[in-house]
Amino acid sequence: MGNRLLALFVAAALLLNGCGRHSADSVAGAPPKKILNFGNGTEPQDIDPQAVNGVPEFNIILALLEGLVSYDPHDQHPIPGVAKSWEISPDNLVYTFHLREDAKWSNGDPVTAQDFLLSYKRMLTPSLGAEYAYMIFNYVAGAKDYYDGKLKDFSQVGIKAPDAHTLQITLTHPTPYLLKAMCHMAWFPVPVKVIAKFGGLDRKGTDWTRPGNFVGNGPFRLKSWQPNQRLVVERSPTYWDRANVKLDEIDFFPVENANAEENMFRTGQLDITSELPPDKIPFYKRDHPDQLRIAPFLGLYFYSCNVKRPPLDNVKVRRALALAIDRESLIKNVVKGDEQPAYAVSYPGVAGYVPRARLTGTVDEARRLLAEAGYPDGRGFPPLELLYNTSEGHRAIAEAIQQMWKKNLNVDISLHNEEWKVYLDALNTKNYQLGRYGWIADYIDPNVFLDLWETGGGNNDTNWSDPEYDRLLAASRAAPNDQDRYEIYQKMDAILVDQLPIIPIYYYTRVHLVSPKVKGYWPTLLDMHPWQYVDIDR
Amino acid sequence: MLRFIARRILETIPVLFVIVTVTFFMIRFVPGGPFTAEKAVTPEILRNLEAHYGLDQPLWKQYFNYLGSLLHGDLGPSFKYPNRTVNEIIAEKLPVSIELGTEALLVALVLGLTAGVFAAARRNSWLDYGASGLAMVGICVPTFVMGPLLVLVCAIHFGWFNASGWYTPADRVLPALTLGGYYAAYIARLTRGGMLEVLNQDYIRTARAKGASELRIIFRHALRGGLLPVVAFLGPGIADILTGSFVIETIFQIPGLGREFVTSAFNRDYTLITGTVILYAALIIALNLVVDVVQVWLNPKLRFE
C-alpha cells in the first residue's frame, strides 16, 4: 500500500512536471530564444521612473527606457544614449545635447528634445510628488523655484528645446559629475503623450505602465507583468541600436527570500540572483567558484554617532571606539564577502579619487584616548546603545563589535534592534546614540559620500556640523576642474577622519550568483548593467 | 435557525466597524510612515508626496474620507505600489491564497482523517503508534523547516519540481504538502481523540451487540460524532490556513495575500493594511459562523440549547 502510494505520487509528480517545468519556447528548427532569468529582489513598485525609487525598479527601467547618456557596460562612465553628442560651455554651466534622429519610442514616434523637456517638467511638478525630483532641481537653474511653486512659468527654468533634436540645460553651478548623475533613471524621458491619455501628467499610478499601454524608448519593451510572479521584457523592434541587442527576452523574478533564490538558481530557474546568504559563500567559494560573483560595490557600511548625546559628544570616545574595531577579522569571520575594510569615509579609487586621510592607531592608543575622555579602563562609561534594523547579518556584526569593545576597551554597550521603518524613524528624528547605517551611491563620484555630511543635510543624522566642512563643500561645487575639486575633497575627508561623526567599518561588495552561461554582465561599481550588452548561451 | 444566522450577521457590523477604526488609528501611531526611506527625501518632496495621497489633512478628516470610500467598497490606492489599488491587489492575490488554502486543506483532511480513523480503530497497535508519532512530528516540525526540506529533496536532489514559484500546476504540490501536512497532523490527533471517545459510548456497544460490521460501526455510527472536534477546529483552522500562509508564500514565492498582509505592515502601506485586516476579519467571522451552523447540524444536543 505504502509503496503503491509512493509510486502514485512520483508518477503524478512526473506527469505534472511534463506539463510545464520549463515552458517549451523553441519551435523545431528555429534557434532557441535567448531568455535571461533574472532574480530582481522585490516586486517593483511601478515602472514609471518618476514614481519609484528602488534598485529593482531601476533594473527594469534600464531595459525599457534610455536617457540622454547611458552607462558604459564595463566601467559605467557616461556614453552617448539618445544624445549622440554634446557640448559644454566654457563656464561649465550650459550643456547642449544633440539627439540622434533615429531614436524612436516603441509605438514608432520619434524621441524628441520636447519629450525630454516635458518629462523633466513632469518630474518637477510638485503635485506629482516624485521622490527623485531633487536629482534635477539640485542642479538645473530655476528648477528648485519651479518645484517650490515660486516660479510658475516653466520657460524660465534652464531646460530648452530649440529644435526637435537639440536640448539645452543650464545649471545653477558647475557640476563636474552632471553627466554621471544623468545616467540615473531620474533623467530618463517618459512618453508624455501616452501618459496624458491615461489620466493626466501629474498623476501617479495611472494605467500607462500596464502591459499593452506602456511605451518606452529602451532596448526592450514590456511584454507582460504578473505582480509578484514575473515581469517580462522582449527585444524592442524600434530601438535605434536594435541590431546590437543580444537577448530576446529578460524575465525579472521578484524573489525576496535569498534562500529561495539560491534554490531557484540551483534548479536552473534563475541565471542571476540578486543576493546570496552569507553562510553559503564558503560553499560556493569551494565548490562552484565559477558561479559565485563577488564584486566591489560603491557603498559604505558604518556606525553613525549622534554627537549631541553623551558619551559620543566627545570626539576622543568616538576615536577610541573607531580604533578598537578589528575590521579585517570582522570581514573574515562574520561578514565573509571579501569586503574592503574602511579606514576613511570616501571609497578609495572612485573616479580616480583616493582619500589620503586614514584612520590609524593601535588599541593601546584607543585605551589612552578613552582614559583621557574620563573613562580609564572603561570605568564610569555611561550606558551606550547601538541601534540596528532587525536582521541576522546586522546582529552578527553588532555582536562582534560589542565583543571587540568589551575586550579592547572594557566598555559594555547594549544592542537594540527595531523593525526597518521604526529604525529609520529613530535615525531621522535623531532619537538614538549609535546607529548602523549603509550608504549606496547613485553615481560614481567621490561627492556621493561627502555631501551627506553638510550641516542639516537630509541624511546627516549625526547632529554633526562643521563650518569649515560646509565651506569646503561649497568651494568644491565651484571648483573649475576635477583636480582642484579632489584636493578640496582630501581636506574634507581629513576632517571626517579627525572628527569621526561616523565610524566607517567596511566598503560593500556585491555577492551573488551568476551562471557561467551569462556573458556581457561585467562587475560594475554601481551594479548597473545596461541590458543591450548582456548575452546568454542557450 | 434563520433567526440565529441573521442575528449573527447583524452582530458582525459593529465588530467590523471597531476593527476598521482601531486599525486605522493604530497603524498611524506606529513610528515611520509610508514614505520613510533610507535615502531621506527632502522636506519639500515629502510634503508634496503626502499631499498627493491626502496624508496632509487632519487625521479625523482622513478617517471620515476613508469610511466614506469604504462604504462604496473602495479600499483606496496602495502607497507602496502607486499603479495598483487595494481592491485590485486583493482581487489578484486572494484567489491564489484560497487556491493554496483549498489544496492544503484537502491534503490535511485526506491525510489527517485517514490517519486519525485508522489510529483510533486499531488503538494501541503499531498503526496507532506510527500514525500518532508521525502526527507528533508533523506538529513539532514548523513549516519553515518542512518547506525547505521538501525543496531540497524533491526539487534540488530529484529535480521533480521547481524550487519555488507559482507558474505551473506542479508548482502547487510542494506548498500544499508543506502547509497541509502541518494541519493534517492536528486533524489526525483530533480525529483520533474524538473517535476514541465516541467508540466508548453505549450506542456503539449496542451496534456491536446487534452484529454491525466494524466498517459500518466506524463510518456509519462513530465518524459523525468523532468529527465534532475536527469541525470545531476547522473554522479558525481554515482562517489560519488562509492568513497563516505567509511563511509558505515566502518560502515558495507564491503571489498570495498572506504575504501582502504581512509586508504591507512593514511598508506602512496604510490602505493595504486596513484593507487586508478588514478582509481577514470578515473571513474569520464568516467561517466561525459556518462552523457554528455545521456543529448544530452535526450534534442534535446543541439544537435544544
Image (cartoon, rainbow, N blue to C red):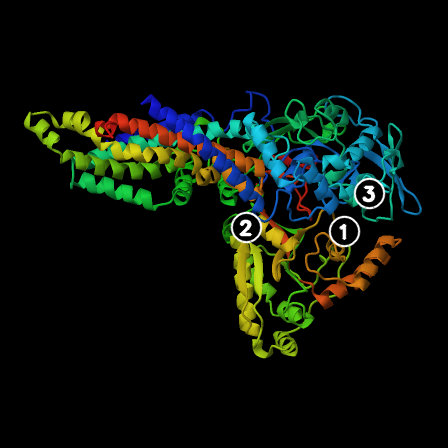
Horizontal side, residue A67 vs residue A261: left or right: right
Label 3 Cα neighbours within 10 Å, binned few <14 / some 14-19 / many ≥20: many
Q: Earlier in the sequence, mark 1 or mark 2?
A: 2
Task: Provide residue A428's location: percent of width, then percent of height.
Answer: 66, 53
**Label 2 CA crowd tier, 10 Å (few <14, some 14–19, many 20+):** some
Instruction: Find residue A144 and name its label.
Output: 3
Quadrant showing the N terminus of chain A = top left
Q: Earlier in the sequence, mark 3 or mark 2?
A: 3
Label 1 resides on the chain identified as A
- Residue neighbourhood size for the residue with mark 1, other residues' Cα within 10 Å, grouped as few (<14), some (14–19), many (≥20): many
Q: CA distance from mark 3 to mark 2?
A: 34 Å
Chain of residue at mark 2: A
Quadrant (top left, top right, bottom left, bottom right) of the C terminus of chain A: top right
Check disc 3 and report its element: helix, strand or loop: helix
Residue named by callout 2:
A419
Amino acid at dot 1: Asp
A93 in relation to A115, above or below = below
Image point (73%, 26%), residue name: A200
Q: Is residue B242 left or right of residue A406?
A: left
